[in-house]
Image (cartoon, grey):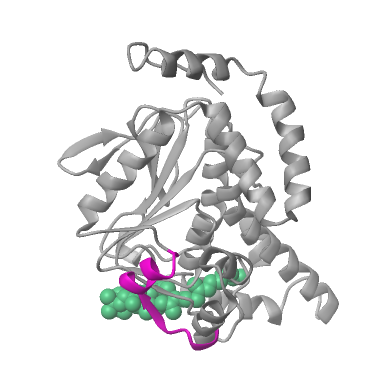
Amino acid sequence: MWALRVMAGRPGRGGVQAAAAAVGVARRGMAATQAAEGYKYETLAVTKPRKHVYLVKINRPEKLNAMNLVFWREIGQCFDQLGDDTSCRAVVLGAEGRVFTAGIDLMDLASIGAAAEGGDGADVARRGRVIHKAIRDFQNSFSALERCPKPVVAAVHNACVGGGVDLVCGADIRYCSSDAWFQVKEVDVGLAADVGTLQRLPKVVGGQSLARELVFTARKMFSAEALQCGFISRIFESKERLEEGALELAATIASKSPVAVQTSKIALIHSRDHSVEEGLDYMAKLNMLMLQSEDVRIAAMAMMSKGENKAIFSKL
Ligand SMILES: CCC/C=C/C=C/C(=O)SCCNC(=O)CCNC(=O)[C@H](O)C(C)(C)COP(=O)(O)OP(=O)(O)OC[C@H]1O[C@@H](n2cnc3c(N)ncnc32)[C@H](O)[C@@H]1OP(=O)(O)O
């Protein structure tokens, strides 16, 4: 089965990249930046353009960054690796080429239909089980953005279609360029979105009405509307300015206590999915450990010195 082939051999967190050497170059503005050491992917270009900041770019520009089977596997691996990487404190997620992403690779989507024809016997229950596993693996890949305790800033330019919306819904912060547009396209290809949009979009935009309108109609939401409804928090005039702005934001985040930032992300995601009382209890349990961190003293000392002493935090 296609799904089993795709997900078979998926390594554990950070497994395959450990021994990989730095390869290639990726463009950032006019400056060429070395590929980040240990991050070797076929469909992603990963660089480290600022201290503690990683830039992950979807890298199939010749296919409009359509999400093929390799991409689905690699995006999860990459964010799990970043989550474990103590040199990483914030991540920017962008894309090479003229569009952010055209969504799932339609050639691969066709293979889902093909899977229903064959597979582990003709029985519907057995075919269903295989497809269920594949969908859960796809979901798990995109959920890696949330599993990664380092804040993820999505930087979207031009088209962000279908699976692209599922993906950026998992980011902590979304910036875009003025030419960006977003389309929950799944109903137009005959399926209900199944890798995160239906679960996260209503919470991101803070309301069911707009989310359902976008989902049921598959209409495009352009940058101005995305900003107005809170899906996006900032618009930039060009793709280059967008990348620079997203990296600046990530660098600011990376300059803060990693204990404070990462605990905040974990607590925010928990609170989104629980009651206020459950969130408060969870917070107290997290901070009964985290308040003992050296970061509290280091940050307080730097504050007291009114900028004379810079806070320097150790790895996390
Ligand atoms: C279990 C599954 C979980 C995941 C589900 C995910 C679902 C989805 O993502 S649904 C959405 C699927 N995507 C689409 O429907 C988008 C289709 N593409 C477009 O609408 C346009 O291409 C786009 C607006 C992105 C750009 O338009 P533009 O006019 O600038 O370019 P085109 O001439 O249309 O395309 C250029 C070549 O790229 C090929 N291409 C475009 N999109 C895809 C794609 N998604 N998959 C594969 N290939 C794609 C297109 O066929 C053109 O190829 P060629 O003719 O060979 O130049």
Please identify the quarter of the rendering in which residue 13 is found.
top right
Drawn side of residue 229 relative to residue 115, left or right:
left
Residue 228 is covered by the magenta coloring = yes
Residue 14, visible in the rendered structure: no
Residue in front for this viewpoint, 238 or 271 = 271
Residue in front for this viewpoint, 293 or 109 = 293
244 shown above or below 164: above
Residue 244, visible in the rendered structure: yes
On the rendered image, what quadrant is the C terminus found in?
top right
Drawn side of residue 169 relative to residue 284, left or right:
left
Residue 128: where, in percent of width, then height? 78, 75
Residue 235: where, in percent of width, then height? 29, 60
Residue in front for this viewpoint, 199 or 94 = 199
Q: Residue at x 63, y 71 (%)?
A: 194
28 shown above or below 126: above
Read off the magenta span.
216-231
215 shown above or below 129: below
Residue in front for this viewpoint, 194 or 121 = 194
Residue 262: where, in percent of width, then height? 57, 35
